[in-house]
Image (spheres, rainbow, N blue to C red):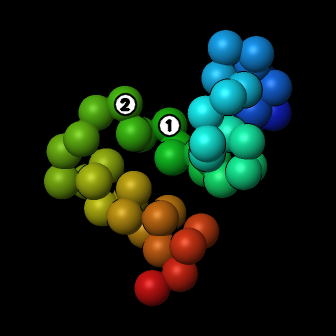
Amino acid sequence: MEAFLDDPVLANLPSVKARKVYAMGEDSFRIDYYSGTQIVDRIVQHLGK
């Protein structure tokens, strides 16, 4: 995550500037029912209901 946040190419993105970047997990490279459910669970975990 730190490598992403410290990347100079991405440094001017609003989400990077605000440090509002979250890891989506290793199963987020494909979206099927299982991985989609995992992604939603992580979003709820990080941001609340």
Q: Relative to residue 46, is residue 19 depicted above or below?
A: above
x and y percent of residue 10 in the render? 65, 23
Q: Which residue is mark 2?
A: 29
Task: Name which residue lies at 45% across and 85% down.
Answer: 49
Q: Secondary structure at mark 2?
A: helix
- The residue lying furthest to the bottom in this view is 49
- How far is disc 1 from disc 2 in space, using C-alphas? 7 Å
Frontmost residue, 2 versus 37: 2
Q: Amino acid at mark 1?
A: Glu
Residue 16 visible, this orientation: yes
x and y percent of residue 48 in the render? 53, 81
Q: Secondary structure at mark 1?
A: helix
Q: Which residue is mark 1?
A: 26
Q: Quarter of the image containing the N terminus?
A: top right
Question: Which labelled disc corresponds to residue 39?
Answer: none
Q: Amino acid at mark 2?
A: Phe
State left or right for residue 26 relative to residue 11: left
Task: Name which residue lies at 37% across and 64% down.
Answer: 40
State left or right for residue 12 relative to residue 24: right
Residue 4 visible, this orientation: no
Frontmost residue, 37 versus 12: 12
Q: Quadrant of residue 15?
A: top right
Frontmost residue, 41 versus 4: 4
Cβ atoms under marks 1 and 2 closer than 8 Å: yes
